[in-house]
Amino acid sequence: MRTPDQVFPSTSEKETIPTEIAFSIDGSAVQVFIKLDGKNWSEVKHGQFHIYSYKTNAVIYSITADLGNFNDPTGWVETWNFTLTHKEENSLYAVATRAVNNFDHHSDWVCQRTETHGQDGSILSMEK
């Protein structure tokens, strides 16, 4: 079983949403990429993101889980959400949140039972 930090490794103890995020949007298909090493882009949660858009706004989201099994009933549920709205011709405002719930977790786990993270900023470059 993977812990949430293995799915989305932290770039520091306090920052669990990387500052460099890229989206690839093609109709209703969306991919999310992050830079973990400062050089190479890596896709996050392949095939797990969805997008809903209306006029100037869009929400890109993923809800995934590991519900454990008969021998190991621990599990987690993780939600990522990116809320986007147009700022100028080639830029967006963005708010990112991530929430994890490690339900019925082992007492020896280092991670918290529940955690949430968020940040906001601007996406300064868009390509068609």
Image: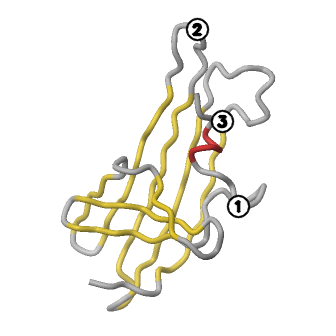
* 4 relative to 68, above or below: below
Q: Distance between the residues labelled 1 and 3?
A: 19 Å
Q: Which residue is drawn at 26% across and 58% down?
A: 52
Front one among 55 and 4: 4
**Image spot of residue 18 (x, y percent):** 61, 65
Nearest to viewer (mark 1 / mark 3): 1
* Dot 2 alpha-carbon crowd within 10 angstroms: few under 14, some 14 to 19, many 20 or more: few
* Dot 3 alpha-carbon crowd within 10 angstroms: few under 14, some 14 to 19, many 20 or more: few
* 66 relative to 36, above or below: above
Q: Residue furthest left?
A: 27
Determine whether, in the image, residue 3 is placed left or right of residue 27.
right
**Image spot of residue 54 (x, y percent):** 22, 66
Determine whether, in the image, residue 49 is placed left or right of residue 97.
left
Sequence-earlier tag: 2 or 3: 2
Q: Which residue lies furthest to the bottom in this view?
A: 89
**Image spot of residue 62 (x, y percent):** 40, 47
Nearest to viewer (mark 2 / mark 3): 2
Q: Residue at x 52, y 62 (%)?
A: 96
Q: How far apart are marks 1 and 2 (CA)?
A: 32 Å
Residue type highlighted by circle 1: Thr
Which residue position is annotated with label 1?
A: 11
Q: Residue furthest front?
A: 40
Which residue position is annotated with label 3?
A: 114
The answer to whether the residue labelled 2 contacts the one labelled 3, judged by CB atoms less than 8 Å apart, is: no
Q: Say how many tags the image has.
A: 3
Residue type highlighted by circle 3: Thr
Residue type highlighted by circle 2: Asn
Q: From the image, which quarter does the C terminus lie in?
A: bottom left
Q: How far apart are marks 2 and 3 (CA)?
A: 22 Å
Rendered image quadrant of residue 85: bottom left
Which residue position is annotated with label 2?
A: 71
